[in-house]
Image (spheres, grey):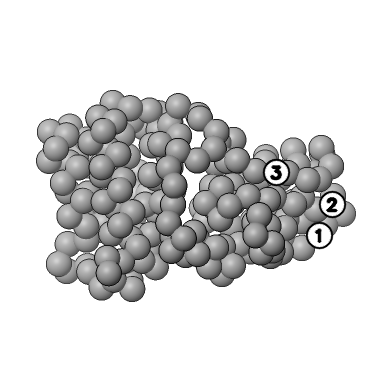
Amino acid sequence: MTHLAQLERDALCDTFVAMGPNAPTLCSPWTTADLAAHLVVRERRPDLAPGIWLPPLASRLESGMEEYAAKPWPELVELVRSGPPKWSPAQFAGVDDAFNFIEYFIHHEDVLRGDETVGPQRELSPRESRALWKMLSRMAKVFFRRSPVGVVLRTPEGQSLEARSATELGTVVLEGTPAELMLAAYGRHRVADLEVTGGESAVDALWAAPLGLT
């Protein structure tokens, strides 16, 4: 059975092919070519990748990404699709899933909803949905650690978890599928199909907070 990260990598590459290199993404001003270049650098260029997190190295990273983004589109997409190089620990399925499944899921949605369309643009398998909920169960407190309000995540099936303890500003309840909740956890709430319950000021405070891993 193909592991989840490779399934999502392949699905994203199929979408890249369908969309072309100049389509908008939620990572504006990046186009699909820019996003593909980011993914190649992240997996294949450890000499450039630190620029993603370290501002002093950002200019070198930007130059490297521009070189990849300028490659012929089929070549660039194939670099993404081929996955981690042989020397990478992510050659092992378990490592690839742990480090790359969510990365590719989020960026796939960045492309599918790049025109700011709200709600699902594809149907996920039960296996993928379970994996997303499992990741939320493990990481929700990290994703929402900077929320100034309490946060509870719920699915339509009745699953629930506390992502952030209640504060003096109150608690916001987010209900949606694991995919839509994951998008909210990564700061993509504007395109997520969610039922949001909470005071207006609490909801505004939540969406103004920097969510996700960064």
In the depicted structure, whether residue 118 falls above or below residue 51: above
How packed mark 3 is, by other alpha carbons closer than 10 Å (few <14, some 14-19, many 20 or more), is few
Q: Position of residue 159 (x, y in %)?
A: 66, 64
Which residue lies under the disc numbered 3?
195
Which residue lies under the disc numbered 2?
170
Amino acid identity at mark 3: Glu
Amino acid identity at mark 2: Gly
| Contact? badges 2 and 1 (CB < 8 Å) | yes
Q: Where is residue 188 in the image (x, y as percent from the top left)?
A: 55, 41
Q: Nearer the viewer, residue 91 or 87?
A: 91
Which residue lies under the disc numbered 1?
166
Q: What element carries label 3?
A: strand
Q: Earlier in the sequence, mark 2 or mark 3?
A: 2
Distance from label 3 to label 1 (Cα)?
19 Å
Q: In which quarter of the image is residue 64?
A: top left
Q: Nearer the viewer, residue 158 or 94?
A: 158
Amino acid identity at mark 1: Ala
In the depicted structure, whether residue 176 falls above or below residue 145: above
Q: Does residue 65 appear to the left or right of 125 in the view shown?
A: left
Residue drawn at 17 percent across, 48 percent down: 79
Distance from label 2 to label 1 (Cα)?
6 Å
| Contact? badges 3 and 1 (CB < 8 Å) | no
Q: Does residue 151 appear to the left or right of 29 in the view shown?
A: right
